[in-house]
Image (tube, rainbow, N blue to C red):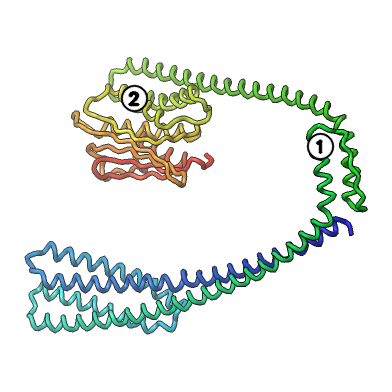
Amino acid sequence: MKILYKLTLGFAIISLLVGLQAYTGYTGATTIKEKYTIVTEETLPVIEHLNNIRVSGLKIVESTNEILKTSMENKDYIDTEIAEISEYSITYNESMEIYESKVNAYFPEERDFLDNTKINMQDILRLSSELINLKKNGGNQSQIEETERAFIRSEDEFITNMDLALDKEKDELQERTEITNEVMEKLRYNSIFSGIISIFIALGMGYYLSHRISLPIIELKNASSEISKGNLETQIEINTKDEIEDLGRTFNLMTNNLSNSRNETALAIEKQKILNDNLKKSLNEKDMLLREIHHRVKNNLQIVTSLLNLQSQTIEEEKQRLIFTESQNRIYAMALIHEKLYQSQSVEKIDLKEYITGIVTNISESYGNKSNIKFDINVENISLNIDYAVPTGLIINELITNSYKYAFPDKRQGIITIFVRSDENEMIHISIRDNGIGIEKDLDIRNTSSLGLKLIVSLAESQIHGELILNRENGTEFQINFRQDQKL
């Protein structure tokens, strides 16, 4: 029998066993997944929302009892408890809506629990409202006591019904879990059995192929070892009347050709080395050219900044001069990127911490290094590529400028905090916060005439496809969250 037929038969049998094993595992895993899906999508949500309904009902009862025990003079405490009743009523309604949908879809036999729960909660809410009104309006004690007794009865009925419903669902969960465990146990036994059968068959096929094929292959291996030592005159003789004999003849022909090709190979290696050296040289030249481009762009932007500075010196009106200063800072933020790229080992990415420090220093110098304003910079080691560095730098420049100009009027003491980090999902989070007077509460940053805010919103949401959040508590905080791996 030809080796091809031998190997094909052996591999076909092993493949069939592996396929059977895989099919058994797949069908078992699919069944387990279906069982767990039933549990997670049907039973567990019902238990969760039944617990939410139970807690909401008990909390409403507890808050109502607290109101009844509290003197009307303690109005603030009573109002707080009433607010909690409203919150728990909302939680009850939300959970009841989901619970009802699950019962209608998967557990129609539990409709009685659902209806009883609704009735109990309606009674609790109604009696709670009556008791609170009687308390507020100074109702007579006998009327309050009668309503309280009805309230307690409703609470007892509610707890009893909820406990029965939860017990029912827990039994359902236990039953489904046991079914899933039975399926898993069956899959385990099937896997062990088929695995043992596969091992025995594979061992038998291995022994057969080893006995029929291994000896000629060992001879080929020994001859190959001699070839590896440089003995290109090595020849072998194999008489197996199959492909291994053909391989032996081919091996002998190979040894003859190896000697001839050795010199050709050495010449090809030398040519490849020269080619690699030329390629490395070309890459170095392109890297130097790219650095020179960044250097020239930086110089050109600095010239533009200098021209704006000269022009601003001829303007007497302070407001117009500040417009020129802001434009200079924006151009500087872009120029600084090219300067960092020119100076760094990488021509594609910049160190964000060094870049932000440079922006802060430039803004401080532009506005006269105000002694009343301090900076707290906390930036992780993050590298930004140039596509994100330019819009991010402009955003940071605008936010720091706004805080520097407007957050601390009349030389008020303050701190501008800059915090940048990245998380495990490669999201970059930037926070620019000041503890100044705060931004106007009625100001809509997405509908304003301010060029700076328009620029911030456009760059954050449209340019880098990020999330822009404004926090007005204890000053002003802007948060920008974005992912760097998006294509702009």
Spatial CA distance of label 1 from label 2 is 71 Å
Kindly identify the amino acid type of the residue bearing the numbered disc 2. Thr
**Residue 114 seen:** no
Horizontal side of 91 relative to 186 (left or right) equals left
Q: Quadrant of the N terminus?
A: bottom right
Q: Which of these two is toward me, 407 or 262?
A: 262
Q: Which residue is mark 2?
A: 361
Q: Quadrant location of residue 212? A: bottom right
Kindly identify the amino acid type of the residue bearing the numbered disc 1. Glu
Mark 1 packing: few (<14 Cα in 10 Å), some, or many (20+)?
some
Q: Quadrant location of residue 367? A: top left
* Residue beneath the point at 32% across and 70% down: 52
* Residue beneath the point at 30% across and 36% down: 417
**Residue 260 percent across, percent down from the top left:** 87, 29
Mark 2 packing: few (<14 Cα in 10 Å), some, or many (20+)?
few
**Residue 375 percent across, percent down from the top left:** 29, 31
**Residue 155 seen:** yes
Q: Which residue is mark 1?
A: 226
